Image (tube, coloured by chain):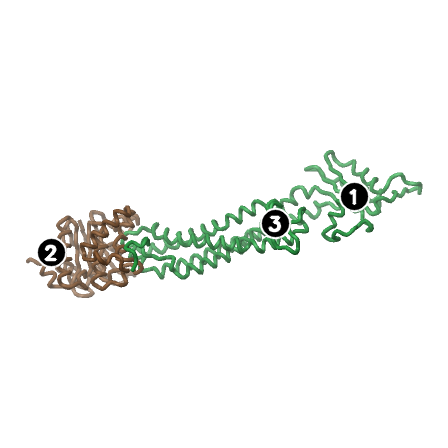
C-alpha cells in the first residue's frame, strides 16, 4: 500500500531509470579528467605569465674564482677581485637596475634541492650575481663581451633568450589543455545525450500520456534536465574531489621548487595549509569550484535540447 | 463547439492512403455524440485527432472554438489540450502512481494548489466508487477499477470536451449505466461528450445523435431516436 498522495508528481520516476546511475559515474570520470586538465592549464598559464613578466628581465651572472685578484695585462698586482670588477661593470647598466650578489646562505638555499643541507663551503662555487633590469630596459649588446674581456670565464645567462621559447611552450600547453577540456565537455555532452535518449525510450509511453494530459514541452524537458543536472553536479563534484588526491601528490612533487616547504616526502598531506592556499593559484581554485556547476549546466542544456527535439515528434 | 470541414488524416508518408478521409460534421457545445462503426473504421483515430494527438493533414478542424492548424504554436495546443478529457481504451494510467496521484495529474499539470487538488480527488473518487481505493497502486487495480480511475482522471479538471474510447468495456452493466448517466449529466452541464463504442445496448439506453464511420469515412450521421 502507498499513501494516497505519494509526493511523486507525475509518474516519470526518473530516479529509477538505470542509465542515470551510469551517467553519474561517467560524469564523475569526466570531472576527474577535467579537474586534472584545469590544474595543468592553470600551471601552464602561471608559467606563461611568469615568463612574460618579471623573469624575462632577469640576468644571472656567474663569476668563477670570484675572490681571486683580477689579472692585469701588464702583470702588475691587481687591486680588485674578479667579482668586484664585474660589479663595477654592472654599475653602468640603466638607472633602476637592481644588482645583487647572492650571499653564502642564499647560495646554499638555492642549491639545497640538489646538495641538501650539507655544508657546501668546501666546494669551489662561483659567485652568483642577480640583475633585475627595469621594465622595458634591454641588456646592452656590449655587456657580455666586455665582461668576458675584463673578467675572463664570466658566464652571463639572460632569461629572455630562452624565456620566449618557454613562454611558447607554456602557451602551447595551455592550448592543449583547452582542447582537452573541450574534448571532455564534448564527451560529457555525448554521454548525457545517450543517457537522455535511453531515458526517453524507456519512458516513451508515460511521456506520451503526460503530453496528452496537457504537460508542456518545458515541463517534460525541465523534469528530465533537472534530473540529469543533479546527477551531473554530483558526478562533477565527485570527480573534482577524486582529483584532489593526485593534485596533492603533484604539489608534493613540486615541493623542492616552492619557497616554503608544503610537505615532507614522508607525509602525503601538507603540514602548512596556509602556505598551500597561498601557493595554489586562485584561478585554479575558482575553476575547480566551478567544475561541478559546469558539469550540471552541460547535462541540463544537453537534456533540454534532446527532450525538446524528441517532443517535436508529438503535436 | 467542435467542427470538422473536409478533414483528412494520413499516417506517415504522403502517398499512403488516409486513415480518415473528408470528414465533415459539427457538434455544438454541450452536445453528445455516439461514435459508431466496425473495428478498424477509424473511431480511435478520430478521437486521437480530436484530442490533438495528431493534426489533420487536410481540411480545417475547430476544437472548443479554436481552429487547429498544422502550424499552430505548441503552447496554444498545450492550453487547448488542458480543456479536453480523454479516456483511452487501454486506460494509460501511470503504473508507479497510486489511484489518487493518477487522478490528480491533470490538476497538478495546471499547478493548482495541493489542498484543492486533494479535496477534488477525494470527491471524484468517491463519486466513481473508488473512495476506498485511493492509495492502491494503479497496477493492482482490476480492469473495471482502472477504467473508472481513467474516467475520473479525464473529468476531474472539468474539461469542455470529453472523449471516451470504449469506456464501458471493462465495466459491469450497472457501472456502465451509471457512467452513461454521468456523461449525460456532464453534457447537460455544457460539456461536449463524444463516446466511441461497440455496445449497442448502451446506445439504445441513451438515445442521442451518432456518427457512423466506415473505412475512415463518415457514412451516416443521425439520431438513435429516429
Residue A44 in percent (x, y) is at 61, 49
Residue projecting furthest to the left: B226
Q: On the picture, is B65 further left or further right than A151? A: left
Q: Which residue is mark 1?
A: A144
C-alpha separation, residue under disc 3 versus residue under disc 1: 31 Å
C-alpha separation, residue under disc 2 versus residue under disc 3: 81 Å
Q: Which residue is mark 2?
A: B209
Is residue A315 visible from the viewing direction of this image? no
Q: Secondary structure at mark 2?
A: strand
On the same chain: label 2 and label 1?
no
Q: Residue drawn 13% across and 59% down?
A: B177
Residue B143 in percent (x, y) is at 22, 64
On the same chain: label 3 and label 1?
yes
Q: Which residue is mark 3?
A: A44
Residue in the foreground of this view, choosing between A29 and A8: A8
Q: Residue drawn 75% across and 39% down?
A: A99
Mark toward the start of the polypeptide (3 vs 1): 3
Q: On the picture, is A40 further left or further right than A59? A: left
Q: Colour of chain B?
A: brown
Local packing at callout 1 (Cα closer than 10 Å; few below 14, some 14-19, many 20+) is some
Q: Which chain is green?
A: A
- Output the chain of dot 1: A
Residue in the foreground of this view, choosing between A286 and A241: A241
In the rendered image, which quarter is residue B134 located in? bottom left
Q: On the picture, is B165 further left or further right than A158? A: left
Q: Secondary structure at mark 1?
A: helix
Q: On the picture, is B200 further left or further right than B67? A: left
CB atoms at circles 3 and 1 under 8 Å apart? Answer: no
Of tags 2 and 1, which is closer to the observer? 2
Total numbered labels: 3
Amino acid at each position: 500500500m502507498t499513501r494516497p498522495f505519494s509526493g511523486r508528481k507525475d509518474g516519470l520516476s526518473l530516479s529509477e531509470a538505470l542509465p542515470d546511475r551510469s551517467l553519474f559515474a561517467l560524469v564523475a570520470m569526466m570531472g576527474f579528467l577535467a579537474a586534472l586538465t584545469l590544474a595543468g592549464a592553470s600551471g601552464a598559464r602561471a608559467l606563461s605569465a611568469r615568463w612574460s613578466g618579471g623573469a624575462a628581465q632577469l640576468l644571472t651572472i656567474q663569476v668563477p674564482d670570484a675572490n681571486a685578484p683580477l689579472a692585469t695585462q701588464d702583470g702588475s698586482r691587481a687591486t680588485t677581485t674578479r667579482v668586484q670588477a664585474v660589479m663595477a661593470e654592472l654599475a653602468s647598466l640603466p638607472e633602476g637596475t637592481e644588482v645583487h650578489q647572492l650571499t653564502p646562505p642564499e647560495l646554499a638555499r638555492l642549491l639545497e634541492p640538489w646538495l641538501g643541507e650539507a655544508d657546501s663551503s668546501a666546494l669551489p662555487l662561483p659567485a652568483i650575481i642577480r640583475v633585475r633590469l627595469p621594465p622595458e630596459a634591454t641588456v646592452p649588446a656590449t655587456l657580455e663581451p666586455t665582461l668576458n674581456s675584463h673578467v675572463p670565464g664570466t658566464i652571463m645567462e639572460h632569461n629572455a633568450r630562452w624565456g620566449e621559447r618557454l613562454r611558447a611552450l607554456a602557451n602551447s600547453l595551455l592550448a592543449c589543455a583547452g582542447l582537452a577540456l573541450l574534448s571532455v565537455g564534448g564527451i560529457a555532452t555525448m554521454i548525457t545525450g545517450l543517457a537522455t535518449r535511453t531515458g526517453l525510450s524507456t519512458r516513451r509511453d508515460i511521456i506520451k500520456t503526460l503530453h496528452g494530459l496537457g504537460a508542456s514541452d518545458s515541463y517534460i524537458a525541465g523534469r528530465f534536465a533537472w534530473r540529469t543536472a543533479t546527477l551531473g553536479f554530483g558526478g562533477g563534484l565527485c570527480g573534482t574531489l577524486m582529483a584532489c588526491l593526485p593534485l596533492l601528490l603533484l604539489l608534493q612533487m613540486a615541493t623542492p621548487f616552492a619557497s616554503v616547504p608544503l610537505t615532507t616526502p614522508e607525509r602525503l598531506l601538507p603540514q602548512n595549509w596556509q602556505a598551500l592556499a597561498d601557493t595554489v593559484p586562485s584561478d585554479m581554485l575558482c575553476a575547480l569550484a566551478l567544475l561541478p556547476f559546469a558539469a550540471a549546466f552541460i547535462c541540463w542544456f544537453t537534456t533540454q535540447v534532446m527532450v525538446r527535439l524528441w517532443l517535436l515528434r508529438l503535436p | 463547439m467542435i467542427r470538422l470541414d473536409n478533414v483528412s488524416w494520413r499516417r506517415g508518408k504522403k502517398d499512403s492512403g488516409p486513415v480518415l478521409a473528408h470528414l465533415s460534421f459539427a457538434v455544438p457545445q454541450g452536445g453528445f455524440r455516439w461514435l459508431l462503426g466496425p473495428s478498424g473504421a477509424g473511431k480511435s483515430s478520430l478521437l486521437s485527432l480530436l484530442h490533438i494527438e495528431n493534426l489533420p493533414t487536410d481540411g480545417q478542424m475547430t476544437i472548443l472554438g479554436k481552429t487547429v492548424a498544422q502550424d499552430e504554436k505548441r503552447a496554444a495546443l498545450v492550453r487547448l489540450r488542458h480543456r479536453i478529457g480523454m479516456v483511452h481504451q487501454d486506460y494509460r494510467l501511470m503504473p508507479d502512481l497510486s489511484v489518487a496521484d493518477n487522478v490528480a495529474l491533470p490538476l497538478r499539470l495546471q499547478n493548482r494548489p495541493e489542498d484543492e487538488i486533494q479535496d477534488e480527488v477525494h470527491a471524484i473518487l468517491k463519486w466513481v466508487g473508488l473512495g476506498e481505493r485511493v492509495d492502491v497502486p494503479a497496477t493492482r487495480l482490476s480492469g473495471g477499477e482502472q477504467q473508472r480511475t481513467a474516467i475520473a482522471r479525464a473529468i476531474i479538471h472539468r474539461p469542455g470536451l470529453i472523449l471516451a474510447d470504449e469506456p464501458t468495456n471493462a465495466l459491469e452493466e450497472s457501472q456502465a449505466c451509471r457512467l452513461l448517466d454521468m456523461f449525460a449529466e456532464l453534457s447537460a452541464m455544457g460539456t461536449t461528450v463524444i463516446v466511441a463504442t461497440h455496445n449497442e445496448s448502451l446506445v439504445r439506453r441513451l438515445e442521442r445523435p451518432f456518427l457512423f464511420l466506415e473505412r475512415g469515412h463518415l457514412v451516416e450521421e443521425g439520431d438513435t431516436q429516429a
